[in-house]
Structure formats: structure tokens, C-alpha cells
Image (cartoon, helix red, strand yellow):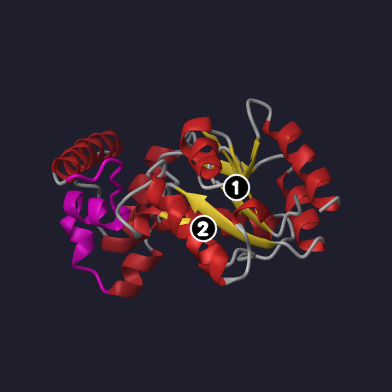
Amino acid sequence: MRIRAAIFDIYGTLLEVGPPPADAAARWTHAWLATLGIAPRLGLAEFTDGCSQFVAAEHAAARERGIAFPEVYWPDVVETMLPEFARLPASARASSPVYDAGFLHTVRLMPGATAALCAAQTASLRLGLASNCQPYSLRELGDALAAAGLPRKPFDPRLSFLSFEHGFSKPDPHVFRLLTARLRTLGIAPGEAVMIGDRTDNDLDPARACGWQTLAVGTEPAAGLARLREMFLNA
């Protein structure tokens, strides 16, 4: 069937995730000194452990309210752990690296992603995102796309589900019901959309349940994205 829309997962599909940078602790200290002028009250390990505990508690509370696949909002997590930053003006908070994930992981554009996205644009496909992610994810993706010479924001917000905006996440079936409804408002049938992801449970199965086409990047994302490029060129 003809493809008119391509919806991408972010992590493990468009972005390859690596370990924290070697100088993560130094960056953490610099972020405090540059923003607040003081040494860190919490070490980086204490911060990440505290965040994990807070997120687990938030998820448990949400599940008790019937939300099977809950999502948190990372700035709230940061400000619960670091109330010093919550008291800053909005502009200072927005520019502070403590709200990003640069201490926690490194990312780069997945090999093959540039060619696949270029082929999608050549084919005049509508592009979207379906991702369990946070505000910093969009900055990471935009930076990676810009470094590859691509537009920072090639994705249509109408065809994008970003979990932090909704409070729940994939594989909740409502994710793909929502996107299917939005596709229909653009005159695109479910079978004319393809979901591209690295996980069968989160990405592919719920998309198929809504009648979408799917493509798994699998354990060799570069090869999967190369197949996707050929699919787009023949769309």
C-alpha cells in the first residue's frame, strides 16, 4: 500500500544512546557554579539515584489511578530534587544544563537516519514522532539533525506523540488511536502510515493493531534504516 506518513521513534531509532560522558561529574559541578554560583549540594550519583526513586514513586501512584503506562515530566523531577533551581527565573531554568540529560547519556544520530529522512522528504511524506521522551529529547534530536545538515524540526506536531506532554506513554493503545485520529483529519488512512521503531512491544505491535504498516530497525538499525530509505524512494 502507498505510504503517505512516516512516524518515528526517537531513542534507538533516530538517536543512538551511549554511556554518560567521561567528564559528567565535572559538567555537573560546572552547571551549579555557572547557574547558582555554588558547589553542588548533591553529587551526580545522589541526584540520579534520587530521581530514580522519585520517578518510581510517581509511576506507582499513577498506576494506582489506573494509568497503565505512566510518564513523568522531567523538569518537575529536577525541581523536586533541586529546589534551588526551581526558584530561578524561567529563562535561567531553560538554559541550565541540569534540565537536560547530558550528564546521564550521550547521543548521536543513528547511522542511516540522515539518508532515510532525506528520502522521506524527497517522497513528500508527512513525518511525525511517537516517542517516550522528555523536553530535552527534542533538543538532543534537533542538535543531531542540525549537525547532519538537516532541518531541526522536520516533524509535524499534529502527527507527533511525545509522552511528557500527555502523562502516559507507549505502548498504551491510546497513543496510536490518537495518532490514527490525527492522520484521518489529514486525509491519511491508517494503512498509509508506517511506524518505524526498535521495539516490537512499544512501537510495532500497537501500531499494527491500529492498521498501520511497520518497519523494525531491529538489532542493526543502520540496515533497517537503509531498508526504510528504499521503501521511501519507492513510495
109 or 172: which is nearer to us?
172
Residue 216 at x, y = what percent? 64, 34
Q: Kindly give the residue lying farthest to the right in the view shown.
A: 234
Q: For numbered disc 1, what is the local secondary structure?
A: loop
- Residue at (18, 67) in percent of width and height: 87
Q: What separation in Å lies between label 1 and label 2 (alpha carbons)? A: 9 Å
In this rendering, position of residue 5 left or right of residue 172: right
| Disc 1: which residue | 212
Residue 63 at x, y = what percent? 19, 41
Residue 104 at x, y = what percent? 41, 39
Residue 8 at x, y = what percent? 59, 49
Residue 199 position (above or below residue 39): above
| Disc 2: which residue | 180
- Residue at (63, 25) in percent of width and height: 219
- Label 1 amino acid? Trp
Are there few (<14), some (14-19), or many (20+) residues within 10 Å of tag 1?
Answer: many
In this rendering, position of residue 178 left or right of residue 158: left
Q: Are the residues flagged by discs 1 and 2 in contact, CB closer than 8 Å? A: yes
- Label 2 amino acid? Thr
- Residue at (25, 50) in percent of width and height: 39
Q: Kindly give the residue lying farthest to the top in the view shown.
A: 219
First in residue order: circle 1 vs circle 2: 2
Q: Write down the region rendered in magenta.
A: 66-89
43 or 53: which is nearer to us?
53
Q: For numbered disc 2, what is the local secondary structure?
A: helix
